[in-house]
Amino acid sequence: MIPQIEPWIGEEELSQLQEVVADRWITEGKKTQQFEERIRDYTQAKHAISICNGTAALYVCLKALGIGPGDDVLVPDLTFIATANAVIMAGATPVFVDVDSSTLTMDPVKAQEAITVHTKAIMPVHLYGVAADMEALLRVARGRGLALVEDAAQGIGVMARNRHVGTIGDIGILSFYGNKTITCGEGGMILTQNDALAKKCWMLKNHGREVKGTFIHPTIGYNFCLTDLQAAVGLAQFGKLPAILEHKRRIRETYERLLGPLDDVAFPDPHPGRVDWFTSIIVDDPAALADALKEKGIGSRRFFYPLHRQPAFSHFPKREFPVTDDAYDHGLSLPSTATIPESDIRKVCDAIRDFFKK
Ligand SMILES: Cc1ncc(COP(=O)(O)O)c(C=O)c1O
């Protein structure tokens, strides 16, 4: 089986984990602090606050911004469902916005059109390693006095306007779920330049207190902490980040070289600053191609199911999202594990060629 994606983990992670076990401090501690420092320096965020996962991170960002019942938050229609569910967790309502056909991220013109008196925030997603149009979205948000929350769950390493994504709006998040560019198994990071928001986020994830070890809690908070076991894996992964990014770039270039001559396969538009988290292709019938690849032991993944078509959101107002529908109807992500050998990429491309020969 050639998986669509799996983490590159081994000796480096084991060695970091051994240190934590030997130290016997396995909850949030020194390793977590080191991991936060690495991510803070890498992204040039003023604050990097670790958290148990990206979904909780989005929820905490919204709560820190004071968003709750009666408020609307704009989210792109093409994303993983956690983007919208975090809004619902905060008691607010996600409002879906169609995406731009080139970046597959929130269309700023359609975002502007979707704003009402209830809108409190815009939450673009940097999807599949491509940055949303932050310049235009910032203009829309600032023009209407709205918060800009960046869902950069898939975005480590992605740059926009010479800044790391997640640090451009008011606040942003990264995810370290198992399929992400670097992983802790589960994990997340909140990024912000804003001291007051950082403090609120820290308290929200830490039982409503400013420091650990005290039992007087000025505000209501929760336990969304990362553990040193996860941070140890994250630190080892972070050490490999430059190599992972380089491997992923080479994987995409190899697919482009081998599949380039095929008329039936197109690649999404290239964008500066992107990371090739997944290499994806655009084809007529991704479901049939995915089935054919599966028969040959090759994993692949359709694009995210549009939010407006999700059974979980069937009670939401019915609207049209033609660009998201088109992306879902034609997109397929190919095996993109950082360590995939070139011989496996050739097998995948041969299988795709065979499929189109029939
Ligand atoms: C766009 C997007 N938002 C949010 C999340 C949620 O992150 P997590 O799985 O860490 O909760 C994910 C991925 O998992 C994601 O891809």
Image (cartoon, rainbow, N blue to C red):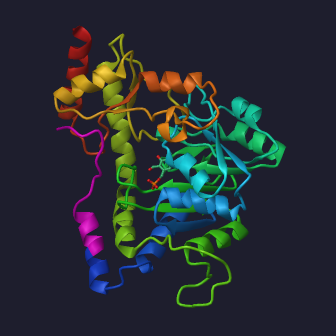
Work out whether residue 87 can be spotted.
Answer: yes
What percent of the width, then of the height, locates residue 160? 60, 43
Q: Which residues are magenta?
A: 1-17
Report the residue at 64% width, 46% height from top: 123
Residue sticking out furthest to the front: 315
Magenta segment: does it hold 114?
A: no
Asked if residue 311 is positioned above or below residue 209 in the image, the reply reads above
Name the quadrant of the N terminus. top left
Work out whether residue 44 can be spotted.
Answer: no
What percent of the width, then of the height, locates residue 6? 28, 47
Magenta segment: does it hold 15?
A: yes
Report the residue at 76% width, 44% height from top: 141
Report the residue at 53% width, 36% height from top: 307
- In this rendering, position of residue 84 left or right of residue 249: right
Report the residue at 23% width, 60% height from top: 10
Name the quadrant of the C terminus. top left
7 or 158: nearer the eye?
Answer: 7
What percent of the width, then of the height, locates residue 322? 58, 21
Asked if residue 95 is positioned above or below residue 46 in the image, the reply reads above
Name the quadrant containing residue 222.
bottom right
